[in-house]
Image: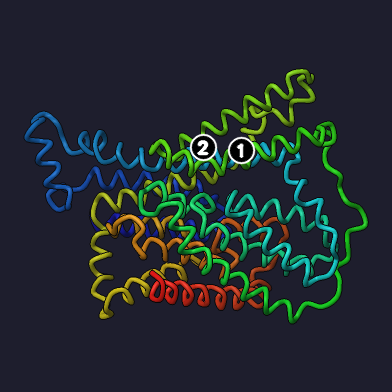
Amino acid sequence: MFYLMIVVFVVGYACIALEHPLRVNKSATALILGTLMWVCFALGDPSTMPVFDAFQNHLSANPDSNFASWLTHGPLLERLGEVAEILFFLLGAMTIVEIVDTHGGFRIITDKIATTKKTTLLWIIGFLTFFMSAVLDNLTTSIVMIALLRKLIGDRHDRWFYAGIVILAANAGGAWSPIGDVTTIMLWIGGKISAGNIILMTFIPSLVSIVVPMLFLSFTMKGHVTRPETVATGSSEEIALSKFQRKLVFFLGVGALLFVPVFKTITHLPPYLGMLGGLGVLWVITEIMHRNRSERECNHVAVAAILKRIDTPSILFFLGILMAVAAMQTCGQLEMLSQSMDKIPVEEPGKYYLITGIIGLLSSVIDNVPLVAGAIGMYDFPLDHYFWEFIAYAAGTGGSILIIGSAAGVAVMGMEKIDFIWYLKKISLLALVGYLAGCAVYILQKSLFF
């Protein structure tokens, strides 16, 4: 069963990667994969597994127990708790962002952009996406920025270049923030990185990874963009909200997100509690704000209605894939992989820079969530070790090399119908150069200043 689990994982992951040709949602595949991995684990021979000693200790104290019972009430429950921390954090963050967006809060930013010059707009979009992604998350930021681009740029192919920069900037911005990307959230919640240190160590490399592509495009993009003839002013529900209400919801929502690292530092409690607490406060305030409205008016802006629009399939995908990786972590396959990778004939720290760099490149093909989850299970480096810092950068920005390599890329591809080959020809090389430049900057600053 030990090796069968590896086969099941590879086949399951291939099905996830081939989601579009197979026309089977990756969330469904991930849930089946996560279940099968633990079933194989439970049906295996414990004497051949690294957990045998722990099971024997349990058996000596509970002679009537069996392997499946111990697995269910021990490792499985523990791993599920670790995964649940990430899922509840994401659920809270996604809901807060959706509340702000539904109340027209992001228009406070987007309405300020008036330029039509291509190069100026390029840098505005790039930096706006970069910093918004650090506060929100790369997926949500990409969706918001594509909505903005549709108001600013009429020509579809012009818009595609800016959409490509949105993908690069969203992934780069998420890499240096503890709440900007699922992988950094996993590392932060897992006790691998601290909020202040990850910002300090990966901000400049992440910035370089987006500045380099934008510098190149600045020399090739000339002229002005054409604005769309008609610009949507928003839904009737948004128009009914006052400017004060929009600002209030925007600043409360962003404040709730920014307060999470402070909450963890002060209380030493898990970040998901701070996120859920912030959601609760925002929920109460919006309920008070709309209490004099009719039920029909509140159908769009009520949090109960907003919760129905949350991207639940993505939450279930993370649940399935993280539980599958957790099974391999508990059973010992990831430990076996780490031992084989440690045999690379390169001295430390070069060996781990090489391993992490490869993981970053792989994230352009394979989703970075299981890659980082696997690395967490493979290595036991201390808090703020350079391996965790570098993997936060590499896994976050490496997915930009292919449009299918990140959640932000897939979302933008679907919204703008960007062709895979077009992105490969026009953006992928820029993303690769930016990624390698950021890697070099991280290694250089680590060797010179830290």
Side of 356 relative to 382 (left or right): right
Q: Position of residue 29 (x, y in %)?
A: 47, 49
- Residue farthest to the right, as pictured: 229
Is residue 4 placed above or below 340 in the rendered structure? above
| Residue drawn at 64 percent across, 52 percent down | 141
Q: Position of residue 404 (x, y in %)?
A: 57, 63
Residue type (three-letter) at the residue carrying disc 1: Ile
Tag shown at residue 96: 1
In the figure, residue 337 lies in which quadrant? Answer: bottom left
Label 1, label 2: how far apart the Cα atoms are: 9 Å
**Rendering colour mode:** rainbow
**Residue nearest the viewer, comparing 192 with 168:** 192
Pointer 1 and pointer 2: residues touching (CB < 8 Å)?
Answer: yes
Residue type (three-letter) at the residue carrying disc 2: Met
Is residue 250 placed above or below 209 in the rendered structure? above
Q: Position of residue 216 (x, y in %)?
A: 68, 79
**Residue nearest the viewer, comparing 86 with 445:** 445
Tag shown at residue 275: 2
Tag shown at residue 105: none
